[in-house]
Image (spheres, helix red, strand yellow):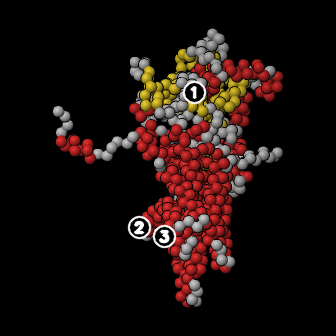
Amino acid sequence: MSSSTPTSSLRTALEPPKATPRLQLLRAWLTVERVEALFVVITFVAMMSGLVAERIGAPAVWSTMAYVIAYITGGTFGLQAGLQSLRERRIDVDLLMILAALGAAVVGAPFEGAMLLFLFSLSNVLQAYALGRTRNAIRALMQLRPDRATLKRPDGQTVVVPIETLQIGDHILIRPGERVPLDGMVISGESSLDQSTLTGESIPVSKGPGDMVFAGTINQTGVLEVSVTRLAQDSTIARLIRLVEEAQSEKAPTERFLDKFEQYYASGVIAFTLMLILVPWLVFSQPFEPTFYRAITVMVVASPCALIISTPAAILSAIANGARRGVLFKGGAHLEQMAKLDVIAFDKTGTLTVGKPTVTDVTIIPLSGNLQEARLTTPEHVRQEQENILLTLAAAVEFMSEHPLALAIVETAKCRKLRLPAVTDFKATHGKGVRGRVDFMGGMDIAIGSPRYFDDFETTGMEAAIAEMERLQDEGKTAVLVGKLAHTKDGKPLAHILGVIAIADVIRPEAPSAVRALKALGVKRVVMLTGDNQRVARAVARQVGVDEFYADLLPEDKVARVKALRADAQGRPQAVAMVGDGVNDAPALASATMGIAMGAAGTDVALETADVVLMSDNLRNLPYAIALSRAARRVIVQNITFAVAVIVVLVISALGFQLPLPIGVVGHEGSTVLVVLNGLRLLAFRAPAEPPVSAA
């Protein structure tokens, strides 16, 4: 006896049979895009079959059936789009094409109508394919993220799991050659990572404990243990995909104008077509068929297909190109705006500079106090050894301090692989310096600080050290003295000044060339804004090559300065871009015509607030973005000019020279395809050659 109930049996009987594997495969293959492409093929075959049937004298029913099939398959998607527009109280190109095809059938030219539907649907398929490539170029980034990860359990065992099962705080292992599955922070291990998929930079980036790693990047050398900080759907690369897709859906001003223009223009074309039919026929008593044929031809050639697609074809291609390079435009409007920039204002710290204090100079003060003589007579290898000893002594003491300058000295010693001796009796004097007894050559007391720190000591070498400090400070660097403490014969404290160490936030290596490239592109003024003092600002401005700089600025001062830059000397408006790190420069970014955040890999605020995001820390991407936006503007102008010219020529030919409908169809649809292909050229856009450095 069956255990199933009558109800369950009835439900089973009413359910459709389960799809076979072949049917499931067919359903998966038949996407909307593939169905539309299949309909295009059927339309062509049916259209040609109808023509052959007419030519060989077959029964009329055969050609009629062939043309009916061609009209159905060629007009289905256009009719759906046209009816949807009517429901929204709009008239668009799709409706014009359907009406024109039906009109051709009415005047006894079903082949011409079928050819119109074939070419129109073919151009739509080609457009969808071409514009889909711009989206696929970005969406392919998501496929670079692996779908599984090696989870390290608390007991030390490892297991491979889907990334969707991982939680924040889980530890994962990333071996050489593997892609990082999720954003996280390195817990242990050191390696270099290829971040080109995210930032566009091909140079690997070193990673160690405390550094962030991002999904989709490639681990190249060592094994890393990483603590997950973001879930799969929140990773940097996933957010990049979403932002680019949102940008592609946000229309540029030109595109928005053409969309509105299409509605009025399409209505005008229909009204003009009706006038071309009714006036000659009713007023001048001309024959209906040739009058109607000419009017339908005018409707076809006057349709603005190429004009409407001219802008999105270029905009979407440019956005995709920029994203592959690591430049994220937050919409077509910002892409167009970037082409019009007159002034670019840079924040200094973290933008033109690295944003991290670095030791730039290590100067040994000789016992004679004569620096110039020492530099000329001391061999290079001896000088290098003396500098390493000075750094060793200073870093050993500064290792006990948390001051940013101290961290810079310690980091430099580590980079030089110097072994730091032990330190006892460490003592810090706030605002002046630090001291400690270093276990080096039997032990010595070392002090590091400003000249004020040594006010209570008798000193040797101080005069030469002060002169060197002033020279370094004129270059925008912060300098500290390193002294060996002792006592005079009568017991007074004594300090022998051993040397001077200079620390600075060094400029980015590419900053000068980026500024030169901006000027070569025709940017009128390049300005630097900073809260640093005049001396440091002047030194950085001189090295980078900006036109002018403003120092000692608070955040509200930067806002005021940006607003002042938005008008030139004659009071005419200027388009101003503010480039900053997207966090502490947010007010100035918002005040500018365009806000540009750089180094945004993993920076939520930058991704959310800026109009354009430079995903890597490479300033060369800024002139690249401007060149790309200007290339996009040129392509848009080319497309619009070409589309309008084709419409004008075809309309004049149809009205004055009896243009045949087939030629009008080919001219109209051919111009649409050419406009799309011209826009796709931006996918292959490359950076312009860097301008040469002036001999001056």
Label whose residue precedes the other's in the sequence (1 or 2): 2
In the structure shown, which secondary structural element does the residue marked by tag 3 occupy?
A: loop
- The residue singled out by tag 1 in the image is 177
Which-is-in-front pick, marks 1 and 2?
Answer: 2
Residue type beneath disc 1: Gly
Residue 225 screen position, x and y as percent: 49, 24
Residue type beneath disc 3: Ile
Residue 41 screen position, x and y as percent: 55, 55
Q: Nearer the viewer, residue 343 or 76?
A: 76
Q: Residues within 10 Å of mark 2 (few under 14, many from 20)?
A: few
- The residue singled out by tag 3 in the image is 91
Label whose residue precedes the other's in the sequence (1 or 3): 3
Residue displayed at 47% across by 48% down: 30
In the structure shown, which secondary structural element does the residue marked by tag 2 occupy?
A: helix
- The residue singled out by tag 2 in the image is 87
Q: Nearer the viewer, residue 155 or 17?
A: 17
Left or right, 393 with reference to 608:
right
Q: Nearer the viewer, residue 562 or 513?
A: 513
State how many labels appear: 3
Left or right, 172 with reference to 319:
left
In the structure shown, which secondary structural element does the residue marked by tag 1 occupy?
A: loop
